[in-house]
């Protein structure tokens, strides 16, 4: 299966250990997890893919941490969403998505930055700079903003930062944006700010970054960002600062 799109565990031991944990500890604030549910994967957001032994056909289900509720009694579980009628159908969907997107966005354009793993452990401005350089260089080289899902891929891992760490990085990210001279790199910096605002649950830039906010707004006048969703979000946050 296309690994970049798959949250299915491929190691049997991972499947066993994950299910043991769910049955012992519960899931995402829910007090329990049914013995009849066999979890087969988990995405970075904590959503769980699973089979339900109480249903026929081997359908693949999703427990969405934002809307679903799990309990030891299957009848008390709420808002579990069917993803496919069978595992083979689910994998076929993954392949189709992969093939559709690969035609638009080359593999080399995808943001698979190893730098983020280090940044996640240490939310330091210098490590943010390294992460930005690795990702923005790829983004500009492939002109990813012209390709389907190109902006969605950019800095997508930042969603996995904790709110406090993301907040600490807002000011250095603002400073990074003020130094970008080309369209691609400036747009990438705006994308980074957008991701950090989302992860930190903020609607404005920290007051200490006010001078950077003014510079970013001024610099944006030289670039056409009308089709950039991130700019809509970031511009609003900058004006509030």
Image (tube, helix red, strand yellow):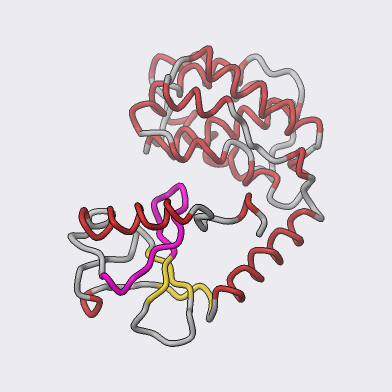
- Which quadrant would residue 86 be assigned to in this image? bottom right
Residue at 45% in and 27% down: 120
Rendering coords of residue 53 (x, y %): 36, 79
Q: Quadrant of residue 220?
A: top right
Total marks drawn?
A: 0
Q: Is residue 90 above or below residue 22?
A: below
The stretch drawn in magenta includes residue 187: no
- Say which residue appears at 67% left-offset and 24% top-offset: 134
In the rendered structure, the answer to whether residue 153 lies left or right of residue 52 reads right
Furthest-bottom residue in this view: 56
Region of the chain picked out in magenta, as a range: 35-49
Query: Which quadrant is home to the C terminus?
Result: top left
Q: Residue at coordinates 49% horizontally, 23% vertically from top-left?
A: 119
User: Does the magenta-highlighted stretch encompass residue 40?
Assistant: yes
Q: Is residue 3 left or right of residue 205?
A: right
- Decide which of 30, 72 is in the foreground and name it: 72
Q: Residue at x 37, y 65 (%)?
A: 63
Q: Position of residue 25 (x, y in %)?
A: 21, 53
Q: On the rendered structure, is 147 left or right of 55?
A: right
- Picture coordinates of residue 225, whole percent (x, y): 69, 38
Q: Nearer the viewer, residue 238 or 66?
A: 66
- Front-most of 26 and 226? 26
Image position, residue 108 (x, y; %): 77, 38
Q: Is residue 167 above or below residue 152?
A: above
Quarter occupied by residue 50: bottom left
Which quarter of the image is occupied by the N terminus?
A: bottom right
């Amino acid at each position: 299966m296309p690994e970049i799109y798959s949250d299915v565990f491929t190691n049997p031991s991972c499947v066993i250990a994950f299910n043991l944990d769910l049955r012992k500890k519960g899931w995402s604030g829910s007090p329990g997890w049914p013995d009849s549910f066999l979890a087969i994967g988990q995405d970075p957001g904590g959503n769980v893919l699973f089979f339900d032994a109480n249903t026929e056909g081997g359908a693949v289900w999703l427990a969405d941490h934002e809307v679903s509720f799990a309990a030891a009694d299957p009848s008390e579980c709420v808002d579990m969403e069917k993803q496919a009628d069978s595992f083979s159908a689910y994998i076929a969907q993954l392949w189709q998505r992969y093939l559709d997107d690969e035609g638009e966005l080359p593999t080399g354009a995808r943001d698979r930055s190893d730098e983020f793993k280090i940044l996640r452990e240490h939310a330091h401005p210098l490590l943010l700079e390294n992460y930005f350089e690795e990702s923005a260089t790829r983004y500009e080289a492939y002109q990813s903003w012209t390709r389907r899902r190109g902006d969605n891929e950019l800095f997508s891992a930042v969603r996995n930062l904790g709110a406090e760490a993301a907040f600490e990085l807002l000011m250095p990210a603002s400073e990074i944006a003020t130094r970008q001279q080309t369209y691609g790199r400036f747009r990438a910096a705006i994308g980074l700010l957008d991701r950090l605002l989302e992860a930190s649950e903020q609607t404005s830039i920290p007051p200490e970054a006010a001078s950077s906010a003014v510079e970013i707004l001024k610099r944006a006048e030289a670039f056409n960002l009308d089709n950039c969703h991130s700019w809509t979000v970031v511009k609003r946050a900058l004006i509030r600062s």
